[in-house]
Amino acid sequence: MTTESAMPRTRLQILVCDGPSCGVTHESELLKELLVARVAADPELQGRVHVVDYMCFGRCSEGPNMFVRRLGPQERADAEPDSAAFSGERGFYPGMDRGKCERVLAQHCKAGVVVGDLVDDY
Ligand code: FES
């Protein structure tokens, strides 16, 4: 018997802040590399989850920050959205590290459940 994910084909975009604060220590770059590698290695995420740089969420002191959002059917996966794309979406994750990224991939991206103790209002 196979168990199907709660959101098997929903396309997601993980926006990783590469702004002047989050990106300055290269920490966000390392997190982006981790996310890209994990997505590429996981058949449940590959081709469905897209990791993209984002200029700045305006929450610079809390970084490194990222946002997980659903992509519309016609939306380009590699394009940075404008801020209106975040309304109604609960996916802002501040203060990320490697362990938190793993949890977001497993819970939010694979199971479709926002990680309640990591997500914040945006
Ligand atoms: S530099 Fe990351 S939120 Fe501004």
Image: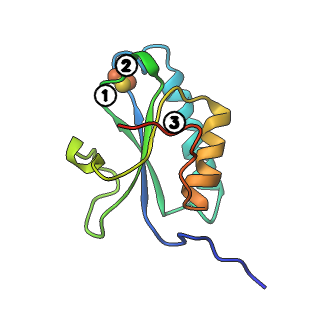
Q: Cα distance, mark 2 to mark 3?
A: 17 Å
Residue at image mark 1: 56
> Could you tell me which secondary element the residue under label 3 belongs to?
helix
Q: Cα distance, mark 1 to mark 3?
A: 15 Å
Camera-side residue of 51 and 100: 100
Instruction: Give the number of the mark in front: 2 or 3.
Output: 2
Name the amino acid type tagged 1.
Cys
**51 left or right of 73?**
right
Q: Earlier in the sequence, mark 1 or mark 3?
A: 3
Name the amino acid type tagged 2.
Cys
Crowding near the residue tagged with mark 3, few <14, some 14–19, many ≥20 C-alpha atoms within 10 Å = many
Residue at image mark 3: 32
Mark 2 Cβ inside 8 Å of ligand 1: yes
Mark 1 Cβ inside 8 Å of ligand 1: yes
Where the C terminus falls, by quadrant?
top left
Give the residue at x 55% y 56%: 109
Mark 3 Cβ inside 8 Å of ligand 1: no
Query: Mark on residue 16?
Result: none
Crowding near the residue tagged with mark 1, few <14, some 14–19, many ≥20 C-alpha atoms within 10 Å = some
